[in-house]
């Protein structure tokens, strides 16, 4: 588990060699030769991408009608490992509404982290939405899903969580290891991360768990999908484990509806059966993907916590009254679709430092015994403001994209006048376990490309707010610990004015009186943000059964974070990738046991 996988992407080396030759040619040969080498380098990058993934095509190149054993809607965190696994025995089609992550430095490079979230257009990898609570958020629109956008932290769910979900613990471990061998690395802690880690231990978040991917109370260094060169690895990389002859992945393929056969009219024992989907390409042309003949073939939704319940609703599965209000023909009155939507409340404290700090996102965590997870990162001011902490300087209902853009513009001006100060900022955040507070998702329009309406009801349950208050006090103890002495100013008056101006734009320092519970509670409510761990909408026991089959219909499952009641572990991507692999194996086993041997 602690070993660091050594992977050399085939599309990197040709480019590196060509660039070196180009540099040499600029010294000794004509510049035209350099230009030709650069063209060859770019050609090599494109060719090697195609060699790595010959089964990926733009949906405009696909047939108008096709048949597969499994149709997976969403090539994201769960969808990619699920597809790779099922393709070992069956023909699989993956339909991803976004593009590919490869060749996009905003996705691949840690120093470009915030650029993904700042890009606002119809083809950007991150689709922005604002919940009805006023908190700005994003949903993935790219092959690899949220693993292409997040801060990289990798930590498994607890054994208790797995048991509660009804999972086979041995297969869970096997599936985690399968993911970790391919895309997970152990970071080397530098000055800021090491200091916060030591501060957590000094402030009582014990014991010291060393380096582990397991979910254990105490302080630990965990994994990352960023390697030590700052290159991001994603769930899309897991497609390299697929059977290339059995899989097709279509990008820019937007599924608008699941197709069902059988109008039961309330007859006992009769269920509608999914038999395919309609998807459109970038030119707006509709295509038909159908399940091939066979009683066990299925459509599987892995479109995420917003996309999966939204697609069920648009396909006629959901609360009958809501479907009727949009004129959607009812397939099944399933009241719980869209219910239980939750996003773990997260609050961050910005820490100005007298000395420069490294560029690092999330690498360590303090797992407290009172239900709060404490994590940290450090980066140039623009990365923090445009990424994790966007807009948290004002209460949620006053936030907007325009405000974030204004903040970024002001920060750039500060960085131009005092560039060194932009690297003297760290942050420490706390995230509430669970959470207990939740809301719902409803359609906004009948266009799948539009965001649905979602409300998370942050801190509506008192226990969530109490955990935030305790988490903020724990952060204060870390900041005041001896380990953090060289990274903190003794007095606010000692902070240089340009640095203080940047801090005020980015986020919030600690409340002045953390002993005042009411003041800290106001701080929690006013500065709440997301780190994209929202979940629910198709929860197990409410929308799907223990095998992730949708209640009341046949040949349809949901396998993604929409099925979670609570976030698994400190950060869900590890468990969600594991779930894709796990369910792929489970489905293969089911078919082996149930189908007659030929």
Image: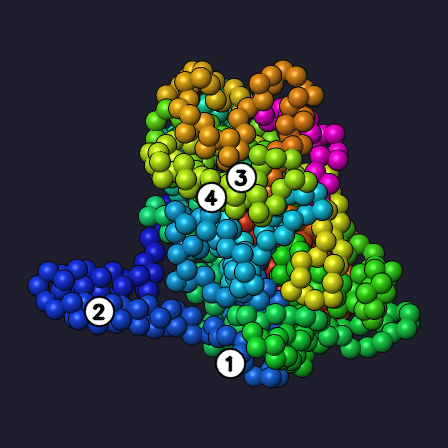
Cα separation, mark 4 vs mark 2, equals 35 Å
Q: Secondary structure at mark 3?
A: loop
Q: Which is nearer the eye, 17 or 157?
A: 17
Q: Total of numbered circles in the picture?
A: 4
Give the labeled residue for mark 2: 35
Q: Position of residue 316 (x, y in %)?
A: 79, 67
Q: Secondary structure at mark 4?
A: helix
- Residue furthest to the left: 28
Q: Secondary structure at mark 2?
A: helix
Q: Position of residue 328 (x, y in %)?
A: 81, 69
Q: Residue at x 55, y 24 (%)?
A: 510
Q: Are marks 1 and 2 in contact (CB under 8 Å)?
A: no
Q: Is residue 461 magenta?
A: yes
* Mark 1 or mark 2: whose residue is earlier in sequence: 2
Quadrant position of the N terminus in the picture: top left
Q: Are marks 1 and 3 in contact (CB under 8 Å)?
A: no
Q: Secondary structure at mark 1?
A: helix
Cα separation, mark 1 vs mark 3, equals 40 Å
Give the labeled residue for mark 3: 389
Give the labeled residue for mark 4: 409
* Mark 4 or mark 2: whose residue is earlier in sequence: 2
Residue 526 circle label:
none
Q: Residues within 10 Å of mark 1 (few under 14, many from 20)?
A: few
Q: Residue at x 45, y 36 (%)?
A: 377
Relative placement, left or right, of 140 versus 55 is right
Query: Is residue 543 at all visible to an observer of this figure?
Result: no
Query: Is residue 148 at all visible to an observer of this figure?
Result: yes
Give the labeled residue for mark 1: 61
Q: Residues within 10 Å of mark 3 (few under 14, many from 20)?
A: many
Q: Is label 4 or label 2 in front?
A: 4
Q: Is residue 163 magenta?
A: no
Q: Which is nearer the eye, 37 or 44?
A: 37
């Amino acid at each position: 588990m602690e070993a660091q996988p050594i992977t050399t992407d085939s599309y990197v080396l040709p480019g590196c060699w060509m660039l070196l030759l180009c540099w040499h040619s600029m010294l000794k040969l004509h510049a035209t030769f350099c230009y030709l080498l650069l063209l060859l380098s770019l050609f090599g990058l494109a060719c090697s991408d195609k060699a790595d993934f010959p089964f990926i095509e733009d949906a405009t190149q696909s047939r108008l009608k096709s048949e597969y054993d499994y149709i997976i809607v969403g090539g994201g965190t769960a969808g990619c490992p699920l597809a790779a696994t099922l393709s070992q025995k069956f023909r699989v089609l993956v339909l991803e509404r976004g593009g590919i992550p490869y060749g996009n430095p905003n996705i691949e490079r840690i120093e470009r982290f915030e650029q993904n979230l700042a890009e606002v257009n119809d083809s950007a990898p991150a689709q922005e939405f604002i919940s009805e609570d006023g908190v700005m958020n994003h949903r993935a629109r790219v092959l690899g899903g949220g693993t292409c956008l997040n801060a990289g932290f990798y930590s498994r769910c607890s054994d208790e969580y797995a048991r509660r979900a009804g999972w086979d613990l041995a297969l869970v471990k096997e599936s985690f290891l399968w993911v970790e061998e391919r895309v997970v690395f152990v970071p080397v802690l530098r000055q800021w991360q090491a200091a916060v880690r030591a501060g957590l231990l000094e402030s009582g978040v014990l014991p010291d768990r060393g380096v582990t991917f397991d979910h254990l109370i105490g302080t630990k260094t965990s994994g990352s999908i960023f390697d030590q060169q700052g290159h991001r690895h994603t769930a899309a990389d897991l497609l390299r484990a697929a059977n290339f002859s059995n899989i097709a992945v279509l990008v820019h393929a937007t599924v608008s509806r699941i197709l069902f056969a059988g109008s039961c009219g309330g007859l006992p024992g009769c269920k509608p059966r999914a038999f395919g989907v309609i998807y459109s390409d970038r030119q707006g042309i509709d295509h038909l993907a159908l399940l091939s003949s066979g009683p066990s073939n299925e459509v599987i939704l892995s479109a995420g916590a917003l996309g999966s319940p939204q697609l069920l609703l648009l396909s006629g599965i959901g609360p009958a009254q809501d479907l009727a209000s949009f004129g959607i023909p009812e397939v099944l009155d399933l009241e719980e679709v869209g219910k239980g939507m939750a996003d773990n409340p997260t609050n961050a404290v910005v820490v100005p430092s007298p000395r420069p700090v490294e560029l690092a996102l999330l690498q360590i965590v303090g797992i407290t015994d009172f239900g709060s997870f404490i994590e940290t990162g450090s980066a140039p001011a623009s990365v923090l403001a445009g990424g994790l902490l966007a807009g948290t300087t004002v209460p949620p209902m006053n936030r907007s994209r325009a405000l974030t853009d204004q903040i970024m513009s002001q920060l750039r001006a500060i960085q131009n006048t005092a560039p060194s100060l932009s690297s003297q900022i760290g942050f420490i955040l706390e995230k509430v376990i669970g959470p207990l507070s939740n809301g719902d998702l409803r359609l906004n329009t009948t266009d799948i490309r539009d965001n649905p309406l979602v409300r998370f009801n942050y801190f509506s349950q008192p226990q969530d707010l109490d955990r935030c208050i305790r988490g903020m006090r724990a952060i204060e103890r870390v900041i005041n610990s001896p380990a953090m002495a060289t990274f903190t100013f003794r007095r606010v008056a000692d902070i240089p004015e340009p640095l203080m101006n940047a801090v005020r734009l980015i986020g919030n320092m600690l409340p002045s009186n953390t002993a005042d519970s009411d003041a800290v509670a106001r701080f929690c409510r006013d500065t709440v943000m997301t780190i994209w761990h929202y979940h629910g909408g198709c929860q197990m026991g409410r929308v799907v059964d223990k095998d992730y089959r949708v209640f009341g219909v046949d040949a349809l499952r949901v396998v993604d974070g929409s099925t979670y009641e609570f976030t698994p572990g400190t950060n869900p991507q590890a468990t969600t990738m594991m779930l894709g692999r796990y369910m792929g194996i489970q489905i293969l086993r089911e078919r082996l046991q149930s189908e007659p041997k030929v």
